[in-house]
């Protein structure tokens, strides 16, 4: 379960901050976290060493975490989605429910 949670977290971080990484880091992190390729597969595909892939993964992941620790976009998005879910439980007004669902769609 830990690997799945980590993959989900990094997919979310990558969607928020991926464009801030170098193009090489973007491609390697996308291959690893989004397309679930192994380090060996990425190295073979890019004709580079496994160590180079591991280095890009390590540095890119660290950068994503640094951006999140400074900006808190993921943390805020998840808190807003949680609050929206709580609001939806107590709503009877269809129009308000539609507005909350629109907010949720935009955050996802």
Image (cartoon, helix red, strand yellow):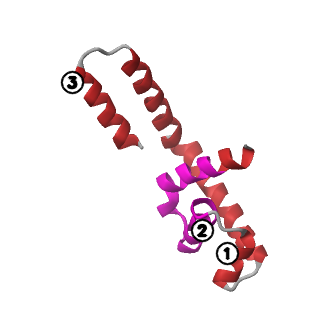
The N terminus, quarter of image: top right
Residue, disc 2:
31
Residue at the image position 56 percent from the left and 71 percent from the top: 27
Residue at the image position 64 percent from the left and 52 percent from the top: 7
> Is residue 105 or residue 28 the one in the foreground?
105
Residue, disc 1:
42
Residue, disc 3:
95
Residue 70 vertical position relative to residue 76 in the rendered view, above or below: below
Residue at the image position 60 percent from the left and 48 percent from the top: 8
Between the C-alphas of marks 1 and 3, the distance is 48 Å
Q: Main secondary structure of the magenta part?
A: helix
Q: Position of residue 91 (x, y in %)?
A: 32, 16
Q: Earlier in the sequence, mark 1 or mark 2?
A: 2
> Is residue 84 or residue 36 the one in the foreground?
36
Q: Position of residue 41 (x, y in %)?
A: 70, 75
Q: Secondary structure at mark 1?
A: helix
Q: Earlier in the sequence, mark 2 or mark 3?
A: 2
Side (left or right) of 103 relative to 62? left
Side (left or right) of 29 relative to 51? left
Q: Is residue 65 visible?
A: no
Whether residue 84 appears in magenta in the rendering, the answer is no
The residues colored magenta run: 7-35
Count of numbered circles in the view: 3
Residue at the image position 71 percent from the left and 78 percent from the top: 43
């Amino acid at each position: 379960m830990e690997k799945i949670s980590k993959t989900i977290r990094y997919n979310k971080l990558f969607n928020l901050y991926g464009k801030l990484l170098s193009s090489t880091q973007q491609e390697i992190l996308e291959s690893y976290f989004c397309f679930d390729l192994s380090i060996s597969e990425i190295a073979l595909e890019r004709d580079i060493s496994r160590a180079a892939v591991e280095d890009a993964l390590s540095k890119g992941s660290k950068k994503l975490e640094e951006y999140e620790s400074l900006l808190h976009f993921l943390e805020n998005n998840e808190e807003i989605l949680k609050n929206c879910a709580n609001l939806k439980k107590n709503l009877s007004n269809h129009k308000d429910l539609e507005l909350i669902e629109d907010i949720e769609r935009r955050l996802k």
